[in-house]
Image (cartoon, grey):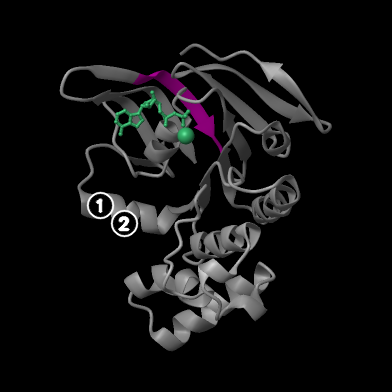
Amino acid sequence: MIHIRQLHKSYHTESLSLHVLKGINLDIEAGEYVSVTGASGSGKSTLLNILGILDSYDQGDYHLNGSLIKNLSEKEAAVYRNEMIGFVFQSFNLINFKNALENVALPLYYKKVSRKKRNIIAMEHLDKMGLRDWSKHLPSELSGGQKQRVAIARAMIANPKVILADEPTGALDSTTTLEVMDVLTNLNREGITTIIVTHEQSVSDATNRIIHLKDGMIEYETRKNNGVHATIQPVNF
Ligand code: ADP
Ligand code: MG
C-alpha cells in the first residue's frame, strides 16, 4: 500500500535549512495497524503529512497504492487524497459553527453529493461511532472523545483506504484515549490501513507494529507477535 525509499525532507527558512527526514525506507501493506513514535521534533508529523499528501518531499520515492506521489499539482494531490486518505488530528479540526452531522457530511459536499444523500450517509457514520443522538450538537457541546469520534466519522465518510492519525489522543484523558483507540482498532479490523503518530505507549501498544523515529531516521521497529512487541532492526537498502 505504502512504499517509501530514501525519503528526505528539509524545511527552509530565510536563514537556515533543517534536515528533518534523513533517508526513510518504509513499507506498509494494506490492512496493517502501525504506529509511529519518537521524541518531539523527530519528524513524526512531517512523515505523516507526506504520507497524507499534505506536504511534499525533496528526495526519494513515495508510492501509494501503486502510484508515484511526487511533484503533483494541488489538484492531482487532492484527487489522490480524497480517494485514499482519511486524516485525524489531535485538535479534531472540526468546524465550530457546524453541527456534528454537517461536519461529518462536509467531504461529501465537496464531492457534490446531494444534501439529502450526504446527510443519510453522515448519519450512518455517526451512528457507527455511537453518536446518533448528538448529530445536531455543535462541537462546543461535545466532550473531547465525542469530538474525536465525529472527526473519525468525517475521515471515514469518503471510504478511504488509509487512516492517518496525528496524536489522535493527545488532547484526551486516559479513559477517553482507550475509547478512541477502540474505535481505531475496530476500523483497522474492518480492513482499513491505519497509521497513528503518538508518543503515548498505551496507544502504540495497541497497534501491531511500532516504527521508532529518531532524528529523522527509523531507529528500529517492533512487531507484535502473540500479543507481545518484539524488536526488528531496520533493513538497509
Ligand atoms: P514531531 O511531529 O515528531 O514532533 P515534526 O515533524 O513536527 O516533529 O517536526 C520536525 C522538525 O521540523 C522540528 O524541529 C520542527 O520544528 C520542524 N518543522 C516542522 N514543520 C516545520 C515547518 N513548516 N517549517 C519549519 N520547520 C518545521
Ligand atoms: Mg508532531
The residue lying at 65 percent from left, 50 percent from top is 188
Is residue 30 at all visible to an observer of this figure?
no
**Residue 216 on the magenta segment:** no
Residue 10 higher or lower than 194, as above or below: above
- Which element carries disc 2, helix, strand or loop? helix
The answer to whether residue 183 is left or right of residue 99 is: right
The residue lying at 40 percent from left, 32 percent from top is 46
Residue at the far left: name it: 14
Q: Which residue has dot 1 on it?
A: 76
Q: How many marks?
A: 2
Could you tell me the amino acid type at mark 2?
Answer: Val
Do callouts 2 and 1 mark residues in contact (Cβ within 8 Å)? yes
Quarter-of-image position of residue 201: top right
| Residue 190 picture location, percent across and down | 67, 56
Along the viewing direction, whichever of 151 and 190 lies nearer the viewer: 151
Residue interval drawn in magenta? 20-29
Label number found at residue 9: none
Q: Which residue has dot 2 on it?
A: 79
The residue lying at 65 percent from left, 72 percent from top is 131
